Amino acid sequence: MNIFIKDALEEITHAYESYENTIEHLREENKKLRDEHYKDAELAAMKSELDSFKEAYYRGFPLTAQEKVQIEEWKKAHDTMEHNNPKGYHGVSGGGFAYIFYPTAIGTPIKCRCNICHKIALNYAVTNGIIKDEFDSATYNDYMREHNALIEINDF
Ligand SMILES: [Zn+2]
């Protein structure tokens, strides 16, 4: 083969390999950019989801794990002692207790109240009123206190 043609072929082959390497390198860089964009999009979606959880958290009135345990223990003791209901069954949909949150500038006290006792205490408070159908808060409070029908938790 002519030495000139051989040199030209080697030069073309070398250039071809160099272009192939460049193309492969660019493909890898392109993939990295797409992955980084994907990561950015994924992080943005996760941040958005976190923001919505935070919003729900601050809008609601969450209990700490310790407060939940304290309330559950009180509920079980109350149901057992007052209503002979150690399993705490309150019908298919539940609803035996009301959770009352009082948002204030210094914290959010929580009360959990037995609805059965609440209804009985309301009935006594109205029928025992000095004037017929007048609500007697002392009678209500006495009944609730005597039957340990309310637990109060201050988170501050
Ligand atoms: Zn009760």
Image (cartoon, rainbow, N blue to C red):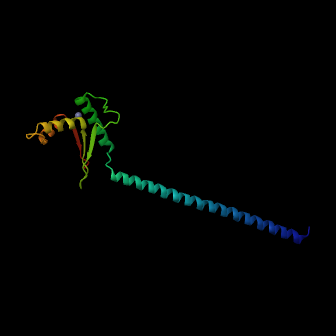
Q: Residue furthest right?
A: 1
Residue 42's spot in the image, x, y percent?
Answer: 51, 56
Residue 129's spot in the image, x, y percent?
Answer: 10, 39
Q: Residue furthest left?
A: 130
Q: Residue furthest bottom?
A: 4
Q: Quadrant of the N terminus?
A: bottom right
Q: Is residue 114 left or right of residue 56?
A: left
Ligand 1's image quarter is top left
Q: Is residue 40 left or right of residue 102?
A: right
Q: Is residue 6 left or right of residue 66?
A: right
Q: Is residue 44 left or right of residue 91?
A: right
Whether residue 54 is situated above or below residue 112 in the rendered picture = below
Residue 142 appears in the figure: no
Residue 82 appears in the figure: yes
Rendered residue at 28%/33% (across/down): 76
Specify the quadrant of the image occupied by residue 27. Answer: bottom right
Whether residue 27 is situated above or below residue 117 in the rendered picture = below
Rendered residue at 70%/65% (across/down): 22
Residue 43's spot in the image, x, y percent?
Answer: 49, 57
Rendered residue at 33%/50% (across/down): 60
Rendered residue at 22%/39% (across/down): 150
